[in-house]
Amino acid sequence: MNPKFTLLLAWYYGIRTISRGPSYIIAALSTPLALLFLVYVLSNGALVRYALVGGFIAIVASVALQSSGDAAFFRLQLRIQDLYVASSVSPSDYMIGLTLSYLMFSLPGIILYGILGAIYHLFSLFAVLMLILVLALLVLSTSSISFIISSSIKHIRNIWGIAGILSVLMTILPPTYYPYESIKRIFLYLLSITPVTPAAVVAQYSFGLSPAMPAELYVLMGETALFFTMARYLTRWREK
Amino acid sequence: MIDVENLVKKYSDGVLALKGISFNASERVTSIIGRNGAGKTTLLRILSTQLMPTSGSVTIKGIDIIRNPDDIRNKIVSIPQEASPIGVLTAFEQVKLYLVGRRFSYSEATREANRSLNEIGLGEFKNTPTDTLSGGMKRKVFVAMALASNAEIVFLDEPTTGLDPLSRMEVWSAIRQIDSHIILTTHYMEEAQELSDEVFLMDSGSIMDKGTVGSLLKKFDGMARAETTAPCSDCIRVSNTYIRYIQKNKVQEYVEKGFTVKNVTLDDLFISRGVSLES
């Protein structure tokens, strides 16, 4: 492990990039804020707490999934990945560095949602601690999915479409903006194939919005371990 | 320094890119020249641990790099073909990040990044985001990485492809500042002549010939290349140009016949391949 490299990559490609092009933040925030507004209007404010909790999850998941575009761009277009393959940088260092960079893009959104959550008196100590745990697991799992996808495509133009589809499938369909009890259990189980679903279920319980479903926390942990391990072995580093 | 034995690379689509090549490279600057599709990039990617071969062995400084790639990676730098820096980052940031990736401390990386960028003439632009730099300057950012890394071997894959002549000369000048062993691929014969101590000629996944520029051109001693656009018998046709190799004492005669006469270069090794020369 080379934590100095991962931190510097996060600093340069996260913070410095934001300071040089704030449009990244607006792009990351636009969909979750638009959906929050939509949920607020359509439910007359009744589901706004769900949308706020779901917003934390949607921002982190969609930003991590968008990272697949950059990872593919670095590999196929800029050839930066090849540069690092032939050096002492390990695939894990590279992957964690890029993931941390994208976490920087999520931070302004998380802060904004934090302010909105405080206005709606959402937070308790338990809720905050659980949210941190859920978001950490979510960053790891969705970034791993991003790397698996980005390293398997052969043409850069394919990634933009795939990332867009995944962003919808993984942030809008799962119960991020609505109570998870609203859908039949069979659909909930089917949607649990994406780590966003168990993350949303656990978060809704932690904020006192929905009943507990303890198995979903284990599902989230299991999926995170699975996707991280898969990324470690399936991400192309030295090509065959 | 680099020993390659019977190296074969067959891609999953069936393309046989390397057909069992063997060689030893030990000069300070070795160029691998060949046309597009000759297998140069495949060879360089295998040597720099980016790509697995189908079979064969490669040892660099005694290390089996097929089985133990991590043992050589801290000793090499490889600049991929048409690599481009991350546009939003400055030249300094890219070089420093690369050096920290190679386990330099932050302070060492800062010092070496500044030194190398100044040495290759990018000091003035080091804090400019690289998407505003010219193509030649972008390429020099990678050369600065190689320069600052103090690696024992530097692999450069077509370092000047796509650059204008002036930018190419600037990059050559930057490459000359690297003290390490250099293995570079190019399809510019002029580049190989400018930079190399030893040249390998590649064609269709095989090495056709090797030697110094002088030894490879020895068969052309006392000869010149005569070109014309008018069809002529016993000439080598390259597109719409007809070429014949002549003794230098016949230059005037050929000029009067309407030929253009030029000095022989490494290009002629490819042009004349398999063609017997005029005595």
Image (cartoon, helix red, strand yellow):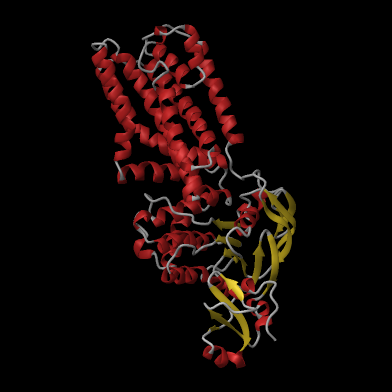
Quarter that holds the N terminus of chain B: bottom right
Toward which corner of the image does residue B224 lie, by quadrant?
bottom right
Q: Is residue A238 above or below residue B177?
A: above
Quarter that holds the C terminus of chain B: bottom right
* Residue at position x 59%, y 66% in the image: B180
Nearest the viewer among B160 and B66 is: B160
Q: Position of residue B20 (x, y in %)?
A: 74, 56
Direction from residue A14 to residue A97 in the image, left or right: right
Q: In this view, does B131 lie above or below A63?
A: below
* Residue at position x 39%, y 13% in the image: A204
* Residue at position x 66%, y 60% in the image: B204
Toward which corner of the image does residue A132 lie, by quadrant?
top left
How many numbered marks are there?
A: 0
Q: Where is residue B167 in the image (x, y as percent from the top left)?
A: 42, 68
Direction from residue A44 to residue B59 in the image, left or right: right
Q: Position of residue A67 (x, y in %)?
A: 44, 36
